[in-house]
Image: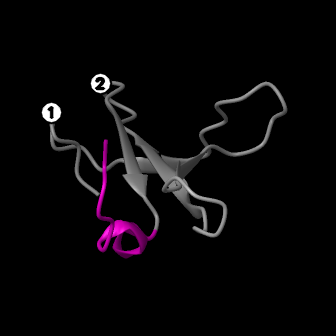
């Protein structure tokens, strides 16, 4: 993946965003007991030259049929 700002090759790194040390993830759940929760891992890339960070859903197609994104 190329850096958006300086076009240097970005490096894939781990992004830890919570106190428990578990990797961060995206989640979505519609209201209702019987609606399943959708989860996806977050991929993180960093530019070693300028420090730009890019976060990306690992499987974005999991969220393509959502009806309510508010």
Q: Is residue 7 left or right of residue 30?
A: left
> Image quarter for residue 15?
top right
Residue at (60, 68) in percent of width and height: 36
| Quadrant housing residue 59 | bottom left
**Residue 61 magenta:** yes
The location of residue 2, given as percent across then percent down, is: 23, 52
Secondary structure mostly seen in magenta is loop
Q: Secondary structure at mark 2?
A: loop
Q: Residues within 10 Å of mark 2 (few under 14, many from 20)?
A: few
| Side of 14 relative to 31 (left or right) | right
Q: In the rendered view, does 11 fall on the left or right side of 13?
A: left
In the foreground, 8 or 35: 35
Give the alpha-carbon distance from disc 1 to disc 2, as whole Å.
8 Å
User: For this rendering, which residue is in front, 48 or 62?
Assistant: 62
Give the percent coordinates (x, y) of residue 65. 31, 74
Residue 70 position (above or below residue 51): below
Q: How is the image coloured?
A: one colour
Residue 50's label in the rendered image is: 2
Asked whether, in this view, residue 8 is left or right of residue 48, the answer is left
Q: Earlier in the sequence, mark 1 or mark 2?
A: 1
Q: Residue furthest right?
A: 20
- Answer above or below: position of 22 versus 28: above
| Magenta span | 59-70
What is the secondary structure assignment of the residue under circle 1? loop
Q: Measuring from the top left, give residue 21's x and y in whole percent.
A: 81, 35
Which quadrant is the N terminus positioned in?
bottom left
Residue 3 sits inside the magenta stretch = no
Tell me whether circle 1 and circle 2 mark residues in contact (CB < 8 Å). Answer: yes
Instruction: Identify the residue shown where x is 64% and y is 31%.
Output: 17
Badge 1: how crowded within 10 Å, few (<14), some, or many (20+)?
few
For residue 6, above or below residue 42: above
Q: Which mark, by number, is residue 5?
A: 1
């Amino acid at each position: 993946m190329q850096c958006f700002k300086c076009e240097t090759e970005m490096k894939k790194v781990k992004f830890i965003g919570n106190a428990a040390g578990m990797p961060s993830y995206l989640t979505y759940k519609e209201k209702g007991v019987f609606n399943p929760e959708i989860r996806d891992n977050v991929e993180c890339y960093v530019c070693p030259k300028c420090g730009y960070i890019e976060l990306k859903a690992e499987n974005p197609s999991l969220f393509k049929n959502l009806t309510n994104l508010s």
